[in-house]
Amino acid sequence: MKQKSEAEAVAEAARHSTGNRQEVEGSKYAGCLSCCAKFDTKEIANWRDEWNSPEKQNRVKRWTAICPRCGKPTVIGSSTGLLDDQAYLLILNHFLTKQPTKRR
């Protein structure tokens, strides 16, 4: 299996962390990219509604899961297959939070 680049991994995580209600509700457990917590999907009580189109007539609501631990909308479900790797959340968290190095 081909390894993903950092940018590909972050893009894939972003796709699965927004408008993800069906994916999360169809999962056994979920994980948060921000706080790296894993939890049962039944613990998710809050959802953020998002719109996928700027034009009013084409708008469709997409619900995004809010992490019950840290309150951020960065949850992905186990049904994506991404959480099968134990280190996935930690690696993605590192990619998302690392600061660009300053050049001298």
Image: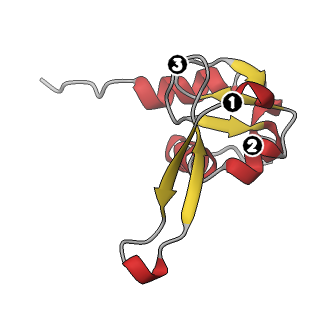
Q: Residue furthest right?
A: 28
- In the picture, measured across the screen, residue 49 lies left or right of residue 3, that is left
In the image, what residue type sits under mark 1? Answer: Ile
Residue 8, numbered label? none
Quarter occupied by residue 60: bottom right
Q: Secondary structure at mark 2?
A: helix
Q: Is residue 28 above or below residue 19?
A: above
Verify CB contact (< 8 Å) between mark 2 and mark 1.
Answer: yes
Secondary structure of residue under mark 1:
loop
Give the residue type that dot 2 points to.
Answer: Val
Q: Which residue lies at the image location 52% right of the left edge and 40% below the top edge?
A: 6
Q: Which residue is mark 2?
A: 24
Q: 40 or 6: which is nearer to us?
A: 40
Residue 24 figure quarter: top right
Q: Residue 54, position in %: x, y?
A: 36, 72
Can you give x and y, in whole percent of width and height, for residue 65 in the image?
61, 39
